[in-house]
Image (tube, rainbow, N blue to C red):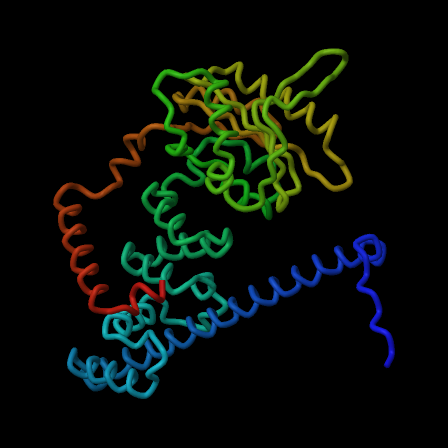
Amino acid sequence: MPETPDPPTTRDMVASGYPEALVGIKAAIAEAHVRAARTVNIEMIQLYWRIGHIILDRQQRHRWGTKVIQCLSTDLRAAYPGRRGFSISNLDYMRRFAAAFPTGPISQQPIGRLGWGSVTILLDKFDTPEERAFYAARAAQSGWSQAVLRDRIRGRLHLREGGAPSTFERTLPAAEQPAAQELARDPWIFDFLRLDRHVSERDVERALVDNLAEVLVELGTGFAYMGRQFRLVTGGDELFLDLLFYHVRLHRYVVFELKVGKFLAEHTGKLSLYLSAVDELISDPTVDGSAIGILLVTERNDHVVEFALRGIDQPMAVSRYTYRELPSEVRGALPDADTLVHGVEAAAARARRQLADPDLTTLQ
């Protein structure tokens, strides 16, 4: 009988490259699982969209009513007993989905890359196609969870994005301006910081770094954090950048300069100095574009900002930020008391439907 070989020692395993191979295999398995799940989700969204169109067509041509939908739900559940998704409420969402997005192919649209739960959120929250399309595109691009999507809707992101005065239109190529306008948000809302009203700039910086995960979610995809009070030395003098990031899609460094208080014209001069230093000292001219500057202030006179930016030939925006409550113009876009009451009642009715209908919770 042949002798059983001794098991390899740890040293033998390391020398043979086993640990690296194991990590690589695990990564490949995880990537395959993600791709498979994404494929399944896309197929499900396409199926729901097709079912919704069939229902819409029959309602228009044969005047299908509630009883027919009830019968359809019963028959589909009987035909596919192990499959969820064919409840009365979910079939109605499919109908609304097809009505809201009438043209295909749905898989080539941002909404077709979202989870079904995110789709139902957009159907519930918005009546206009422009708003639905805005949030669907951002959610698909950034991979937002349902919680992040709800938070962005609550913060009225579609009213804030691109709202800050900037030099982007005349300092950036047209192809890069859409991504840059995402940085020209006004205001930035850092309500997760839970700071007191009277704080210093360093307090805000420290809180942002302490809550870096939430900050990166607020910034969106493509940001790599480089440092706080990032030190540069030029001609023997030290410069300290409040917050430095790298935007991997734009291939540009992004400098955030924080000011607690009202915008002053000299702020743009200081930020311009920082951008020039970044371009000269750390950017790779063969790969990176000019650095982008975002000046964050708590108050701003737009006329003064406009004059100050006229002499700036670098990509720069002046945005407001808040860490306590929504600003007045954003609060003004929120529903009034009567609408809120109606919304609460609708939410309560939806909750009652969910208790009787597991599809609405398990599929989200």
Residue 258 x/y as whole percent: 50, 22
Quarter of the image for residue 195 reads top left
Nearer-the-camera pick, 9 or 116: 9
Q: Is residue 299 above or below residue 138?
A: above
62 displayed left or right of 239: left
| 80 relative to 317 in the view: left or right | left
The extreme front residue here reads 1
**Quadrant position of the C terminus in the picture:** bottom left
Q: Residue at x 61, y 39 (%)?
A: 224
Q: Position of residue 50 (x, y in %)?
A: 38, 78
Most distant residue in the right direction: 2
Q: Residue at x 38, y 65 (%)?
A: 116
From the top left corner, tell me how far across and down residue 3 is, in percent. 86, 74
The residue under the point 33% across, 68% down is 97
Q: Place residue 83 in its image quadrant.
A: bottom left
- From the viewer's side, name the closer residue of 90 and 279: 90
Could you tell me which quadrant the N terminus lies in? bottom right
For the residue pair 170 and 12, the one nearer the viewer reads as 12
Can you say whether 116 is above or below 19 in the image? Answer: below
Q: What residue is at 51 percent from the left and 25 percent from the top? A: 295
